[in-house]
Every structure is written in structure tokens, then in C-alpha cells.
Image: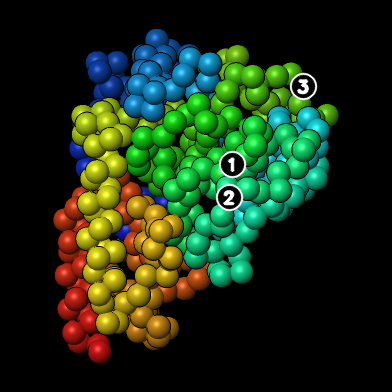
Amino acid sequence: MGRIYNFSAGPAVLPEEVLKEAADEMLDYKGTGMSVMEMSHRSKAYETIIVEAEKDLRELMNIPDNYKVLFLQGGASQQFAMIPMNLMKNKVADYIITGQWAKKAFNEAKLYGKANAIASSEDKTFTYIPDCSDLPISEDADYVYICENNTIYGTKFKTLPNTKGKTLVADVSSCFLSEPMDVSKYGIIYGGVQKNIGPAGVVIVIIHEDLITEDTLPGTPTMLKYKTHADSNSLYNTPPAYGIYICGKVFKWIKNMGGLEAMKVRNEKKAAILYDFLDQSKLFKGTVEKEYRSLMNVPFVTGSDDLDAKFVKEAKAAGLENLKGHRTVGGMRASIYNAMPIEGIQKLVEFMKEFEKNNI
């Protein structure tokens, strides 16, 4: 059948060049006579892979020297607990609720201390980002938490919240490396890689070294202390070795594409094709308020559940896969991460035009 255009929210499309390169090296990585999948994580060859991956990520994001880069397991969801376990010294944290994942993180934090929802967009089904310029930040808050890009609802923080001097923690799973960001504005940036960077099984944490201490909540397991992994350069135990290797290849691919500035231009161009069509379509309608639209996840509806289902089915037959919206919101969602080629968006819009013509 050949390659389809994969609009999945994650695990998601990866650059074809990266997949081909990994395929070429599958049986024999650079003359070692074995696959990276079979390689000891303590070997010289693997050390080169993980060190280079970190070096390339630091270059891409301009990560300051006083931040550590950790390649961990457990996905973004494990960070929901790891963050309060390591950061909740005063047992207080403020959460901005802009979707399901922020809500899950908020509920998890309640297990460890007082979590306050200081702003929310749930009143309009998370179709916007609340005004975060003057929030009731708790005086003794250990950190302020956001999910920067909301995969399910297709919203994105265009301006970071005013945390009034408190540490900002951000889940960037679905916008990781999609555009430049100023790392120094955050205490922790983290994300599961399975949307924009690599295969499922790796979570990357970029953390200010001042937040890495022995002083964690009582009962915090060794494996859930940032210090454990920071002190061992992410090699305390066997890491998700193959996943990190693929991430490293994606970092090189982004560098070859011109870095994060070039990615941003490319992503804006791709998203504009789809949003421009949605804005003039008589059948399809985007669900997010314009100024909060994500470049990565684009939810849309026809207004009829039956038509939505018909669209998803016919799109699949046309080689446009995984366009069904998240089960909590229905409709459709096109996830158009870095590796989605512009041709994929063009084909999607052509298909939508044809579908509109036949169903209006």
C-alpha cells in the first residue's frame, strides 16, 4: 500500500529520512555488528549516541549550562507525580487548567499537597487559553504549572503566564521543538517524545539545576528523584536506549532542516493552509478561538456526528489516517507535527473540499 499521511496525535508521524536511516542501521550499527536495540547501554558506542543526542538538543534549543537534560521513562504522565514529589517543598502548587492533561496533572498533585486551580478554560470546553497576566498566584506556591499546547483541544499558550516570580513548569509534549523557546523562562520543560520527536517510551525533562536536590517528599522512590538521573547522566538504569537513538536522529534532521526558526516558519505555513480552508468552509468549522490556535493539533467538526464519521471513514480510504477526534470531544483532529510534509496538508484540504462539495 505504501506510506499513508498519518495525522495521529501520538505515536505520530516520523521523518521518512530518519526511518530509512534507522532501517539501514538496524542489523549493524556503524560496524559494531549489532543493532542499537541489542547494544549495552554501558558500551562506548551507546555512550556516543546519548551524549550526541543531548548535545544536539542543547544546540537546537539553546539550553543554558545551568539546566540538565534528562532522558527518562514513564511518559509525560509519570511526570505528573514526579514534579510534586521533587518540587513541593511548601506542599503548595498552582495549576492552570487548559485541557485534560493539565487536569490529570492537577489531580495527581493533590495526592502530594495543596494544588490550586488558579485559572481554567473548562467553561467553554477548553477552546481558549485564559488570561494569565494577573493570576491569584499563591504566596507560598512551589511552582506554577501549564500544559503549553493542548493536544486534544488544539490550543496553545502564545504568551507565558505571569508567575510573579514563581517557578514555571510546562508540559510541552505536543509542541516540543516546533518553534524556538526561551528555556530560561522555565524551571522545568518536559514532554513525551511520541508526538514530535521519536517513538513512544521516552520523556525528555529539561530542568534547572537548582530544582535538583536530595530534598524530595518523604517516600519518593529512588527512580523518581531527578537527582538520581541527573547524577548518572540518564544512565542510572537501562534507559529507553533505542528510543533515545531515534530522538537523536530527529534532532539531526531538525538541524539539517535549518533548526527551530525554520521549523516554526514551516509549521506556520502548513497550519495556515488548513486554517484558511476551515475559515471559509461552508461545512467544516474549526473549534478553537482564533488567537489560541495550535500549530500542531487542529480540531474541526461538520456539526453532524454522522457526517463526521463518514468523513473519517472516507478519508481513511483516501490514505489520510487517524483523523478521528479524541473520544472526549468527537469530531476530527489533524495533528500536523514537524514530520508531516506540506503535501499531506494539501492532500487533506483537497479531500475536504471534495467532501464538502458532495455533502452540502
Q: Is residue 4 visible?
A: no
Which residue shows up at 53% across the image and 16% down it? 66
Height in image: 77 above or below 55? below
Label 3 crowd bin: few (<14), some (14–19), many (20+), radius 10 Å: some
Q: Which residue is at the front of the view, 46 or 178?
A: 178
**Amino acid identity at mark 2:** Cys
Quadrant position of residue 92: top right
Work out how far the residue at label 3 is from the one at label 1, CA to CA, in angstroms: 27 Å
Q: Which residue is tagged 3?
A: 215
Question: Which of pointers 2 and 3 lies earlier in the amino acid sequence?
Answer: 2
The reply to whether callout 1 and callout 2 are in contact (CB within 8 Å) is yes
In the picture as drawn, the residue positioned furthest to the front comes out as: 134
Residue 162, numbered circle:
1
Quadrant position of residue 207: top right
Q: Which residue is tagged 2?
A: 132
Work out how far the residue at label 1 is from the one at label 2, CA to CA, in angstroms: 6 Å
Question: Circle 3 sits in a helix, a strand or a loop, which is it?
Answer: loop
**Amino acid identity at mark 1:** Asn
**Apparent side of residue 265 relative to residue 202 in the rendered image (left or right):** left
**Apparent side of residue 65 relative to residue 17 in the rendered image (left or right):** right
Which residue shows up at 55% across the image and 40% down it? 170
